[in-house]
Amino acid sequence: MPAPVTVTVTGAAGQIGYALLFRIASGQMLGPDTPVALRLLEIPQAVKAAEGTAMELADCAFPLLDSVNIYDDATAAFDGVNVALLVGARPRGAGMERSDLLEANGGIFKPQGEAINAGAADDVRVLVVGNPANTNALIAKSHAPDVPADRFTAMTRLDHNRAVSQLASKAGVPVSQVSRLTIWGNHSATQYPDVFHAMVGGRAATDVVDEAWLGGEFIPTVAKRGAAIIDARGASSAASAANAAIDHVHDWVHGTPGGSWTSAGVVSDGSYGVPQGLVSSFPVVSANGSWQIVQDLEIGEFSRSRIDASVAELVSEREAVQSLGLV
Ligand code: NAX
């Protein structure tokens, strides 16, 4: 057996944490040959709940689970970390302005970025799940100047998986027959799920669906799926969010299958007119352990205006955190 990979999960006592930790410990994220040393980071009030989760992890007797340790201090939790899943975040409270939300999350993601900078392993990979995920990733990255910027990513894989599922259902094919779909921009209601390059069962998606369905049903359904889940379940997406985090890290480490791509919030290199340095969702492939933005896709008018709108929101979030001195 190789040496264990150290995985730190923040917000470990939360509902995504509860859906995520058991799948990591069972080997679904890093594969059946990789032992895992789990670190659970929580705020002091939630440490006891994290201890309960750790007891249940022990009770699973997962052969790949090397150890579980619980922390309420980011510096210790990220010391030597290989994979950091930043799930814990401050939700928007009643009457909270967007700048309050960004500031509260800056108070979480700035010190976590600093702690990653101080102690993470050389190969560290960071996935930010906690919202606003893209801008939280930007904040963390800004405080980790010694870590290559491309190690900071934000999760749009849940949006991607939702879009794949909706398109497959509309076309009447299994999800395995949908490929080359993209989520662009922010993980927010402005996100743009793009099917113009997608394939459905060997046919172009645009031969299977029309623009009226795209604009009238598909895009709003994908963008508002989180709210629909809350309405139905009385709680926000947890198992599907955990599943998307598993997919993201799995593909980052093991690579994406040939002939298709997935979506992830990655640091823009200026591709497709997205300002450099923003953490924006793109079509990406993973090869040799790193994400690469799929290049040279033709972007029509329908897509351009929607990508621009979501990127404009990211720019305004960046301006807001700049003015708060968080980046
Ligand atoms: P919960 O409220 O169930 O859990 C959050 C946990 O984070 C709590 O246990 C809390 O004590 C902990 N926490 C807060 N501050 C912390 C800190 N500084 N260090 C460590 N832990 C801290 O939320 P949950 O449903 O698990 O959602 C977590 C985050 O994921 C939220 O921000 C949510 O908005 C976001 N989501 C992101 C998604 C995405 O696609 N990117 C989809 C699902 C989800 O909405």
Image (cartoon, grey):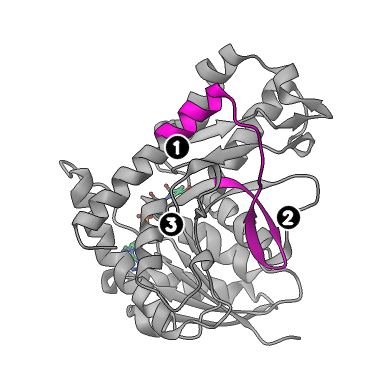
Q: Is residue 308 left or right of residue 156?
A: left
Name the residue rendered at 78%, 27% in the picture.
Answer: 173
CA gap, disc 3 and disc 2? 24 Å
Mark 1, ligand 1, within 8 Å: the answer is yes
Q: For the residue labelled by badge 3, is the local secondary structure a helix, a strand or a loop?
A: loop
Residue at the (62%, 29%) spot, across then down: 166
Indicate the amino acid at tag 3: Gly
Along the horizontal axis of the image, is 235 left or right of 215? Answer: left
Q: Quadrant of residue 313?
A: top left
Residue 254 at x, y percent in the picture: 73, 64
Of labels 3 and 2, earlier in sequence is 2
Q: Which mark is residue 59?
A: none
Q: Which residues are magenta?
A: 282-309
| Amino acid bearing label 1 | Gly
Q: Is residue 48 visible from the viewing direction of this image? A: no
Q: CA distance from mark 2 to mark 1?
A: 26 Å
Numbered disc 2: secondary structure: loop
Residue 236 located left or right of residue 177: left
Residue highlighted by disc 1: 226
Of mark 1 and mark 3, the one earlier in the sequence is: 1
Q: Is residue 7 magenta?
A: no
Q: Which mark is residue 256?
A: 2
Tag 3: Cα neighbours inside 10 Å, few (<14), some, or many (≥20)? some
Gap between marks 1 and 3 measured at Cα: 27 Å
Pointer 2 local density, CA inside 10 Å: few below 14, some 14–19, many at least 20: many
- Determine the residue positioned at 40% across, 42% down: 235
Is residue 117 in view?
yes
The residue lying furthest to the left in this view is: 95
Based on the picture, tell me whether residue 298 belongs to the magenta stretch.
Answer: yes
Q: Identify the residue under disc 3.
A: 277
Give the residue drawn at x 47%, y 45%.
274
